[in-house]
């Protein structure tokens, strides 16, 4: 299969590396622009393509870019952690369609930050491989796997679990995709949940005069605990005070975690 690969971040880099190890033919690479790119050097090195076959994902609407992609004669697209919505004109260039790897258990948590909303809303967490259509993560499902959200998970630890689960699911599913032996399950577009990037604004500031249950407050704080991100905050005297959580199980008598 002649693959057009669209990707960003660790999961994309690992997926592309694995595809190369399977001797798959990568005819084009679509990346985020440099200021939004993560693991870009790894993706470029692994792809090993000339610059004429590397495209800026923010420019996929441009006719010249579409014509350049068409000239490569890709058969299928594979999108992994790619942060741009693609339009029908782009999809029309891919005879076998474009698959997307989304780190949520669709139809729950379409859109942005599924790791956050699985914790805050208590919705199922997992990963899904689906076809891209005109909606946001609404295309036919090819494969998916659910994972458990533990009480000690933060936004970061859950994200890492989703990354590894997604990579494993790709490896298990790709041989069937390649042979055209996959079934497609149509999503009910009126079921599930959808979140935009800005939706986190309504949970990031803690109102000191509002009543929260302990569970609600803990879930919000741990969901937004991630790497260098400062976390949720409250205001005192016009200044923001940030909160992060570190969680762990107690120990069993034998010294192992509960």
Image (cartoon, helix red, strand yellow):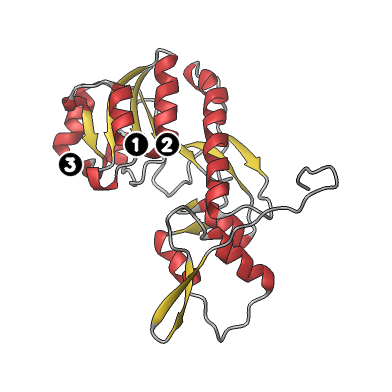
Find numbered disc 1 in the image and state the secondary structure of the residue it sits on: loop
The disc placed on residue 6 is: none
User: Crowdedness of circle 3 by 10 Å Cα count: few (<14), some, many (20+)?
Assistant: few
Q: Residue furthest right?
A: 253
Res. 98 image quadrant:
top left
Depth order, front residue of 111/117:
117
User: Left of 86 or right of it: where is 119?
Assistant: right
| N-term-proximal mark, 1 vs 3 | 1
Depth order, front residue of 194/245:
245
Whether the residues at callouts 2 and 1 have beta carbons within 8 Å, the answer is yes
Residue under pointer 2: 10
Q: Is residue 86 above or below residue 13?
A: below
Q: Is residue 155 above or below residue 199?
A: above
Whether the residues at callouts 3 and 2 have beta carbons within 8 Å, the answer is no
Find numbered disc 2 in the image and state the secondary structure of the residue it sits on: helix
Residue at the image point whose x is 65% and y is 58% from the top: 122
Q: Is residue 64 above or below residue 107?
A: above
| N-term-proximal mark, 3 vs 2 | 2
Query: Foreground mark, 3 or 2?
Result: 2
Whole-number angstrom distance, CA of label 1 to CA of label 3 = 25 Å
User: Left of 157 or right of it: where is 52?
Assistant: left
Depth order, front residue of 244/113:
244
Residue under pointer 1: 39
Residue 85 x %, y %: 34, 47
Query: How many badges with numbers are in the image?
Result: 3
The disc placed on residue 62 is: 3
């Amino acid at each position: 299969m002649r693959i057009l690969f669209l990707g960003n971040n660790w999961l994309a880099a690992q997926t592309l590396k694995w595809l190369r190890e399977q001797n798959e033919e990568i005819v084009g690479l679509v990346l985020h622009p440099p200021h939004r790119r993560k693991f870009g050097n790894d993706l470029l090195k692994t792809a090993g393509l000339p610059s004429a076959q590397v495209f800026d994902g923010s420019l996929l609407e441009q006719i010249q870019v579409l014509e350049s992609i068409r000239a490569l004669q890709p058969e299928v697209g594979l999108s992994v952690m790619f942060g741009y919505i693609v339009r029908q004109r782009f999809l029309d260039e891919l005879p076998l369609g474009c698959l997307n790897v989304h780190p949520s258990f669709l139809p729950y948590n379409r859109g942005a930050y599924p790791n956050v909303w699985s914790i805050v809303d208590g919705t199922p967490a997992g990963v899904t491989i689906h076809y891209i259509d005109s909606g946001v993560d609404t295309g036919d499902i090819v494969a998916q796997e659910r994972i458990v959200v533990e009480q000690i998970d933060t936004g970061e630890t859950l994200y890492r679990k989703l990354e590894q689960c997604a990579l494993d699911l790709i490896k298990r599913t790709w041989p069937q995709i390649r042979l055209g032996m996959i079934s497609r399950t149509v999503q009910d577009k009126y079921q599930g949940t959808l979140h935009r990037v800005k939706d986190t604004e309504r949970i990031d500031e803690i109102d000191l005069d509002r009543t929260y249950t302990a569970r609600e407050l803990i879930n919000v704080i741990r969901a937004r605990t991630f790497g260098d991100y400062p976390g949720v905050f409250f205001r005192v005297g016009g200044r923001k005070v940030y909160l992060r959580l570190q969680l762990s199980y107690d120990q069993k008598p034998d010294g192992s975690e509960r």
